[in-house]
Protein backbone atom coordinates (compact mmCIF):
# COMPACT_ATOMS: atom_id res chain seq x y z
CA UNK A 1 0.00 0.00 0.00
CA UNK A 2 2.90 2.35 0.66
CA UNK A 3 4.13 2.15 -2.94
CA UNK A 4 0.61 2.83 -4.20
CA UNK A 5 0.36 5.82 -1.87
CA UNK A 6 3.75 7.14 -3.02
CA UNK A 7 2.72 6.90 -6.67
CA UNK A 8 -0.58 8.67 -6.04
CA UNK A 9 1.08 11.46 -4.07
CA UNK A 10 4.00 12.06 -6.44
CA UNK A 11 1.83 11.99 -9.57
CA UNK A 12 -0.16 15.00 -8.34
CA UNK A 13 0.70 18.21 -10.27
CA UNK A 14 1.91 19.93 -7.08
CA UNK A 15 4.93 17.66 -6.41
CA UNK A 16 5.60 16.58 -10.00
CA UNK A 17 5.21 19.96 -11.69
CA UNK A 18 3.20 18.59 -14.62
CA UNK A 19 -0.44 17.67 -15.10
CA UNK A 20 -1.47 14.04 -15.10
CA UNK A 21 -2.28 14.26 -18.80
CA UNK A 22 1.20 15.66 -19.50
CA UNK A 23 2.72 12.92 -17.35
CA UNK A 24 0.91 10.30 -19.41
CA UNK A 25 2.34 11.79 -22.60
CA UNK A 26 5.85 11.76 -21.11
CA UNK A 27 5.48 8.13 -20.06
CA UNK A 28 4.31 7.05 -23.51
CA UNK A 29 7.08 9.02 -25.21
CA UNK A 30 10.04 8.00 -23.04
CA UNK A 31 9.26 4.44 -21.94
CA UNK A 32 10.58 2.79 -25.11
CA UNK A 33 13.68 5.02 -25.15
CA UNK A 34 14.47 4.11 -21.54
CA UNK A 35 14.05 0.39 -22.21
CA UNK A 36 16.30 0.61 -25.28
CA UNK A 37 18.97 2.46 -23.28
CA UNK A 38 18.71 -0.13 -20.47
CA UNK A 39 19.12 -3.08 -22.83
CA UNK A 40 22.07 -1.35 -24.50
CA UNK A 41 23.74 -0.79 -21.13
CA UNK A 42 23.20 -4.43 -20.14
CA UNK A 43 24.60 -5.63 -23.46
CA UNK A 44 27.64 -3.38 -23.10
CA UNK A 45 28.25 -4.52 -19.53
CA UNK A 46 27.99 -8.19 -20.47
CA UNK A 47 30.01 -7.85 -23.65
CA UNK A 48 27.62 -10.03 -25.65
CA UNK A 49 23.99 -10.48 -26.60
CA UNK A 50 21.63 -11.68 -23.88
CA UNK A 51 21.25 -15.41 -23.38
CA UNK A 52 18.16 -15.45 -21.21
CA UNK A 53 14.69 -15.23 -22.65
CA UNK A 54 12.71 -11.99 -22.54
CA UNK A 55 11.34 -11.39 -19.05
CA UNK A 56 13.87 -13.61 -17.29
CA UNK A 57 16.50 -12.40 -14.85
CA UNK A 58 16.42 -9.89 -12.02
CA UNK A 59 13.64 -7.30 -12.26
CA UNK A 60 14.35 -3.58 -11.73
CA UNK A 61 13.52 -2.37 -8.23
CA UNK A 62 11.79 0.65 -9.75
CA UNK A 63 9.72 0.35 -12.91
CA UNK A 64 9.98 3.19 -15.41
CA UNK A 65 6.78 4.80 -14.12
CA UNK A 66 8.35 5.24 -10.68
CA UNK A 67 11.67 6.36 -12.12
CA UNK A 68 9.96 9.10 -14.08
CA UNK A 69 8.03 10.17 -10.98
CA UNK A 70 11.09 10.46 -8.72
CA UNK A 71 12.95 12.41 -11.40
CA UNK A 72 10.14 14.92 -11.82
CA UNK A 73 9.71 15.40 -8.07
CA UNK A 74 13.45 15.89 -7.62
CA UNK A 75 13.62 18.44 -10.45
CA UNK A 76 10.61 20.30 -9.13
CA UNK A 77 11.41 20.49 -5.41
CA UNK A 78 15.05 19.33 -5.15
CA UNK A 79 14.06 16.68 -2.62
CA UNK A 80 17.04 14.67 -1.35
CA UNK A 81 17.45 11.25 -2.89
CA UNK A 82 17.20 9.69 0.56
CA UNK A 83 13.68 11.09 1.05
CA UNK A 84 12.50 9.72 -2.30
CA UNK A 85 14.12 6.38 -1.51
CA UNK A 86 12.17 6.22 1.74
CA UNK A 87 8.91 6.96 -0.09
CA UNK A 88 9.41 4.19 -2.65
CA UNK A 89 11.07 1.74 -0.23
CA UNK A 90 14.32 1.38 -2.17
CA UNK A 91 17.96 2.25 -1.57
CA UNK A 92 19.21 5.79 -2.14
CA UNK A 93 21.55 4.59 -4.90
CA UNK A 94 18.54 3.23 -6.80
CA UNK A 95 16.91 6.67 -6.84
CA UNK A 96 20.20 8.31 -7.87
CA UNK A 97 20.59 5.84 -10.75
CA UNK A 98 16.97 6.42 -11.83
CA UNK A 99 17.50 10.18 -12.00
CA UNK A 100 20.73 9.75 -13.96
CA UNK A 101 18.88 7.57 -16.47
CA UNK A 102 15.72 9.65 -16.96
CA UNK A 103 17.22 13.16 -16.86
CA UNK A 104 19.08 12.88 -20.21
CA UNK A 105 15.93 11.51 -21.84
CA UNK A 106 14.03 14.63 -20.76
CA UNK A 107 16.89 16.90 -21.85
CA UNK A 108 16.99 15.36 -25.34
CA UNK A 109 13.29 15.98 -26.03
CA UNK A 110 13.75 19.53 -27.29
CA UNK A 111 11.26 22.39 -27.01
CA UNK A 112 7.60 22.28 -28.01
CA UNK A 113 6.32 24.66 -30.68
CA UNK A 114 3.02 26.51 -30.15
CA UNK A 115 0.25 25.40 -32.52
CA UNK A 116 2.56 22.73 -34.02
CA UNK A 117 1.96 19.44 -32.18
CA UNK A 118 4.79 16.95 -32.60
CA UNK A 119 7.33 19.54 -33.76
CA UNK A 120 10.39 20.11 -31.54
CA UNK A 121 13.14 22.74 -31.58
CA UNK A 122 16.56 21.54 -30.43
CA UNK A 123 19.13 24.03 -31.73
CA UNK A 124 19.54 27.75 -32.31
CA UNK A 125 19.20 27.11 -36.04
CA UNK A 126 15.81 25.47 -35.47
CA UNK A 127 14.57 28.44 -33.44
CA UNK A 128 15.63 31.04 -35.99
CA UNK A 129 14.28 28.98 -38.90
CA UNK A 130 10.93 28.68 -37.11
CA UNK A 131 10.88 32.41 -36.30
CA UNK A 132 11.59 33.32 -39.93
CA UNK A 133 9.03 30.89 -41.36
CA UNK A 134 6.23 31.83 -38.93
CA UNK A 135 7.01 35.54 -38.62
CA UNK A 136 7.70 35.25 -34.86
CA UNK A 137 9.44 38.18 -33.19
CA UNK A 138 11.82 36.68 -30.66
CA UNK A 139 12.51 37.85 -27.12
CA UNK A 140 15.98 37.28 -25.66
CA UNK A 141 17.01 37.47 -22.04
CA UNK A 142 19.89 36.29 -19.90
CA UNK A 143 19.33 34.59 -16.53
CA UNK A 144 21.69 33.48 -13.77
CA UNK A 145 21.41 30.55 -11.37
CA UNK A 146 23.44 30.36 -8.19
CA UNK A 147 25.69 27.30 -7.99
CA UNK A 148 28.11 25.85 -5.46
CA UNK A 149 31.43 27.62 -5.08
CA UNK A 150 34.34 25.74 -6.72
CA UNK A 151 37.03 24.36 -4.45
CA UNK A 152 39.99 26.55 -3.53
CA UNK A 153 42.99 26.64 -5.88
CA UNK A 154 40.97 25.06 -8.69
CA UNK A 155 41.72 26.54 -12.15
CA UNK A 156 38.95 28.79 -13.48
CA UNK A 157 37.46 29.35 -10.04
CA UNK A 158 36.81 33.06 -10.65
CA UNK A 159 35.00 32.37 -13.92
CA UNK A 160 31.77 31.63 -12.02
CA UNK A 161 31.75 34.86 -9.97
CA UNK A 162 29.02 37.07 -11.44
CA UNK A 163 29.85 40.76 -11.65
CA UNK A 164 26.16 41.57 -11.26
CA UNK A 165 25.09 39.28 -8.40
CA UNK A 166 28.50 38.91 -6.70
CA UNK A 167 27.85 35.18 -6.37
CA UNK A 168 28.96 31.99 -8.08
CA UNK A 169 26.47 31.56 -10.91
CA UNK A 170 25.89 29.89 -14.26
CA UNK A 171 24.37 32.04 -16.99
CA UNK A 172 21.81 30.91 -19.58
CA UNK A 173 20.00 32.58 -22.48
CA UNK A 174 16.23 32.25 -22.92
CA UNK A 175 14.27 32.64 -26.18
CA UNK A 176 10.49 33.13 -26.21
CA UNK A 177 7.86 34.44 -28.57
CA UNK A 178 5.79 37.58 -28.06
CA UNK A 179 3.45 35.79 -25.66
CA UNK A 180 6.12 34.37 -23.36
CA UNK A 181 5.97 30.81 -24.67
CA UNK A 182 9.37 29.17 -24.30
CA UNK A 183 11.15 28.30 -27.54
CA UNK A 184 14.68 27.61 -26.28
CA UNK A 185 16.62 27.97 -23.06
CA UNK A 186 20.24 27.03 -22.68
CA UNK A 187 23.49 28.50 -24.03
CA UNK A 188 25.15 27.73 -20.68
CA UNK A 189 28.18 29.82 -19.64
CA UNK A 190 29.98 30.71 -16.40
CA UNK A 191 28.42 33.65 -14.60
CA UNK A 192 31.37 35.99 -15.17
CA UNK A 193 30.79 36.03 -18.94
CA UNK A 194 28.87 39.04 -20.26
CA UNK A 195 25.61 38.55 -22.17
CA UNK A 196 27.14 40.04 -25.31
CA UNK A 197 30.11 37.67 -25.15
CA UNK A 198 27.78 34.70 -24.75
CA UNK A 199 25.83 35.85 -27.82
CA UNK A 200 28.94 35.83 -29.99
CA UNK A 201 30.38 32.64 -28.50
CA UNK A 202 27.28 30.56 -29.21
CA UNK A 203 26.66 31.97 -32.69
CA UNK A 204 23.48 33.95 -31.99
CA UNK A 205 24.87 36.94 -33.86
CA UNK A 206 25.69 34.66 -36.80
CA UNK A 207 22.08 33.48 -36.90
CA UNK A 208 20.87 37.07 -37.20
CA UNK A 209 23.35 37.54 -40.03
CA UNK A 210 22.00 34.47 -41.85
CA UNK A 211 18.28 34.97 -41.11
CA UNK A 212 17.75 38.57 -42.16
CA UNK A 213 13.99 38.35 -41.65
CA UNK A 214 14.18 37.48 -37.95
CA UNK A 215 13.56 40.28 -35.46
CA UNK A 216 13.99 40.32 -31.70
CA UNK A 217 13.54 42.48 -28.62
CA UNK A 218 16.37 42.58 -26.05
CA UNK A 219 17.36 44.46 -22.91
CA UNK A 220 20.30 46.78 -22.30
CA UNK A 221 22.69 43.84 -21.92
CA UNK A 222 22.57 43.30 -25.69
CA UNK A 223 23.23 46.88 -26.87
CA UNK A 224 26.17 45.69 -28.98
CA UNK A 225 23.92 43.24 -30.80
CA UNK A 226 21.35 45.97 -31.41
CA UNK A 227 24.00 48.29 -32.86
CA UNK A 228 25.26 45.56 -35.19
CA UNK A 229 21.74 44.66 -36.39
CA UNK A 230 19.72 47.88 -36.03
CA UNK A 231 16.89 46.73 -38.29
CA UNK A 232 16.46 43.36 -36.58
CA UNK A 233 17.26 43.77 -32.88
CA UNK A 234 15.39 46.33 -30.80
CA UNK A 235 17.00 47.52 -27.54
CA UNK A 236 16.04 50.21 -25.01
CA UNK A 237 16.92 53.74 -26.17
CA UNK A 238 19.77 55.64 -24.56
CA UNK A 239 18.80 58.08 -21.84
CA UNK A 240 18.95 61.73 -22.98
CA UNK A 241 21.44 64.11 -21.40
CA UNK A 242 20.55 66.22 -18.41
CA UNK A 243 20.24 69.36 -20.52
CA UNK A 244 17.73 67.74 -22.88
CA UNK A 245 14.34 69.41 -23.21
CA UNK A 246 11.21 68.00 -21.59
CA UNK A 247 9.92 66.79 -24.95
CA UNK A 248 12.96 64.56 -25.51
CA UNK A 249 12.71 63.20 -21.96
CA UNK A 250 9.03 62.34 -22.35
CA UNK A 251 9.69 60.73 -25.74
CA UNK A 252 12.48 58.63 -24.22
CA UNK A 253 10.26 57.49 -21.37
CA UNK A 254 7.43 56.54 -23.72
CA UNK A 255 9.75 54.64 -26.07
CA UNK A 256 11.30 52.81 -23.16
CA UNK A 257 7.86 51.96 -21.78
CA UNK A 258 6.76 50.44 -25.08
CA UNK A 259 9.96 48.46 -25.42
CA UNK A 260 9.71 47.17 -21.85
CA UNK A 261 6.06 46.24 -22.36
CA UNK A 262 6.98 44.29 -25.50
CA UNK A 263 9.72 42.21 -23.83
CA UNK A 264 8.32 41.71 -20.33
CA UNK A 265 6.93 38.36 -21.49
CA UNK A 266 10.41 36.79 -21.59
CA UNK A 267 10.89 37.89 -17.97
CA UNK A 268 7.73 35.96 -17.14
CA UNK A 269 9.19 32.96 -18.97
CA UNK A 270 12.32 33.11 -16.80
CA UNK A 271 10.08 33.33 -13.73
CA UNK A 272 8.26 30.20 -14.90
CA UNK A 273 11.58 28.37 -15.04
CA UNK A 274 12.42 29.58 -11.53
CA UNK A 275 9.36 27.79 -10.18
CA UNK A 276 11.52 24.65 -10.32
CA UNK A 277 13.78 24.56 -7.26
CA UNK A 278 16.90 23.37 -9.09
CA UNK A 279 16.92 26.54 -11.21
CA UNK A 280 16.65 28.83 -8.19
CA UNK A 281 19.79 27.50 -6.52
CA UNK A 282 21.60 24.53 -7.98
CA UNK A 283 23.41 22.44 -5.37
CA UNK A 284 24.53 19.57 -7.60
CA UNK A 285 27.66 19.14 -9.69
CA UNK A 286 28.16 21.99 -12.15
CA UNK A 287 28.91 19.61 -15.01
CA UNK A 288 25.34 18.30 -14.80
CA UNK A 289 23.68 21.72 -14.76
CA UNK A 290 23.29 22.03 -18.55
CA UNK A 291 21.48 18.68 -18.74
CA UNK A 292 19.28 19.56 -15.75
CA UNK A 293 18.40 22.94 -17.23
CA UNK A 294 17.43 21.42 -20.58
CA UNK A 295 15.31 18.75 -18.87
CA UNK A 296 13.33 21.35 -16.90
CA UNK A 297 13.05 23.75 -19.82
CA UNK A 298 11.64 21.03 -22.08
CA UNK A 299 8.90 20.37 -19.51
CA UNK A 300 8.10 24.08 -19.19
CA UNK A 301 7.96 24.52 -22.96
CA UNK A 302 5.45 21.69 -23.24
CA UNK A 303 3.15 23.43 -20.78
CA UNK A 304 3.58 26.90 -22.27
CA UNK A 305 3.01 25.66 -25.84
CA UNK A 306 -0.49 24.57 -24.85
CA UNK A 307 -1.53 28.14 -24.09
CA UNK A 308 -3.78 29.41 -26.85
CA UNK A 309 -2.50 32.13 -29.16
CA UNK A 310 -4.12 35.39 -28.15
CA UNK A 311 -4.62 38.60 -30.04
CA UNK A 312 -1.67 40.93 -29.84
CA UNK A 313 -2.50 43.96 -27.73
CA UNK A 314 -1.30 47.44 -28.58
CA UNK A 315 0.99 49.49 -26.36
CA UNK A 316 -0.05 52.80 -27.88
CA UNK A 317 -1.27 55.53 -25.55
CA UNK A 318 -5.00 56.18 -25.82
CA UNK A 319 -6.17 59.77 -25.40
CA UNK A 320 -9.25 60.02 -23.22
CA UNK A 321 -11.75 62.77 -23.91
CA UNK A 322 -12.07 65.26 -21.08
CA UNK A 323 -15.66 64.97 -19.76
CA UNK A 324 -15.22 67.31 -16.78
CA UNK A 325 -16.19 70.39 -18.70
Image (cartoon, grey):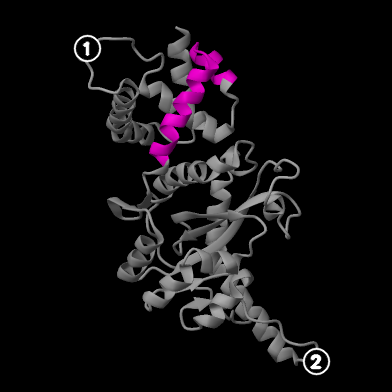
Q: Which residues are magenta?
A: 82-106
Residue 121 position within the rendered picture, expressed as x and y whole percent measured from the top left: 35, 55
User: Can residue 180 be seen at all in this image of the molecule?
Assistant: yes
Label 1 residue SS: loop
Residue 307 numbered mark, or none: none
Q: Is residue 281 above or below residue 37?
A: below
Q: Quadrant of residue 190?
A: bottom right
Q: Which residue is mark 2?
A: 243
Left or right of 296? Residue 23 is: left
Q: Which residue is mark 1?
A: 52
Left or right of 165? Residue 251 is: left
Q: Is residue 89 above or below residue 227?
A: above
Q: Which residue occupies 59% across, 67% down?
A: 197
Residue 211 position within the rendered picture, expressed as x and y whole percent measured from the top left: 37, 74
Residue 181 position within the rendered picture, expressed as x and y whole percent measured from the top left: 44, 56
Badge nearest the viewer, 2 or 1 = 1
Please name whichever residue, 157 or 212, is drawn nearer the observer in this view of the structure: 157
Q: Earlier in the sequence, mark 2 or mark 1?
A: 1
Residue 80 position within the rendered picture, expressed as x and y whole percent measured from the top left: 60, 25
Amino acid sequence: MKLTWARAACSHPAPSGVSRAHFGELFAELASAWEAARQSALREAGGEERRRAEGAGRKPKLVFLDRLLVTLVHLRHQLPHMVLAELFEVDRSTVSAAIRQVRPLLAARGFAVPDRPGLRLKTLGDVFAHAEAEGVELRLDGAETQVRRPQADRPGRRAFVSGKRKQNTIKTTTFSDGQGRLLLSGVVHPGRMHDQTAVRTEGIAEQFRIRLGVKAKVDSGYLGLAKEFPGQVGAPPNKPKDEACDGDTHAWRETRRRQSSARICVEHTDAELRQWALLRRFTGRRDTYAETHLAIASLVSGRSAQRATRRRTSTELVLVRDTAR
